[in-house]
Image: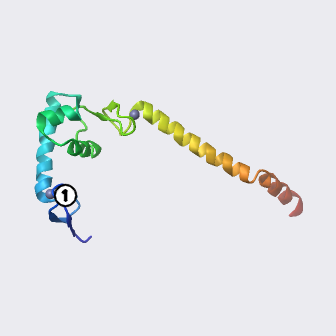
Amino acid sequence: MVNKMRNCPECGKLFIDTGAGMCRDCLRKEEESELIVSSYLRDNPGSTIKEIYDATGVKERTIMRMIRAGRFIGKGKISYPCERCGTLITEGRYCNKCMQELKEDIKKATDAIKQKQQKNNPSSDTRMKSRGMYSNK
Ligand SMILES: [Zn+2]
Ligand SMILES: [Zn+2]
């Protein structure tokens, strides 16, 4: 793998990306932030991102990124908004209600596809079968 020069998404400086996704300075800052947030969470489990931001000054965007990376698993619960409806949740990307609805949406979508396929060739299946049975043997 070739290391690429790119702009740091945090501070905009050019840096050599070795897979960390941000420059060394920002990476160090991020690690510090992670420690700060982790220790805050230990004392205040179940805090919302806004409460953490107010108390630690760590940007909400940074906290969300850490949550998605699974950095706080086992370090205390954190509340953050469901990506679909904004309800506060403590794990995953969606609240239980949205998870349920998304599952149903997926089921409906696959059912619709199946129905469409059946409608497009309504009797070809049976015709094929009977032709095979009588003509080939
Ligand atoms: Zn940077
Ligand atoms: Zn939701």
11 vs 119, left or right, is: left
Q: Is disc 1's CB within 8 Å of ligand 1?
A: yes
In the picture, the quarter occupied by the N terminus is bottom left
Residue at left offset 80%, top offset 57%: 128
- Dividing the picture into quadrants, the one containing residue 93 is top left
84 vs 30, left or right, is: right
116 vs 129, left or right, is: left
- Dividing the picture into quadrants, the one containing residue 96 is top left
How dense is the environment of label 1, judged by Cα within 10 Å: few (below 14), some, or many (20 and up)? Answer: many
Residue 43, image x and y in percent?
A: 14, 28
In the picture, the quarter occupied by the C terminus is bottom right
78 vs 96, left or right, is: left
Residue 112, image x and y in percent?
A: 62, 45
- Which element type, helix, strand or loop, lies under badge 1? loop
**What amino acid is found at the position of numbered circle 1 in the picture?**
Met
Residue 57, image x and y in percent?
A: 12, 39
Residue 123, image x and y in percent?
A: 80, 51
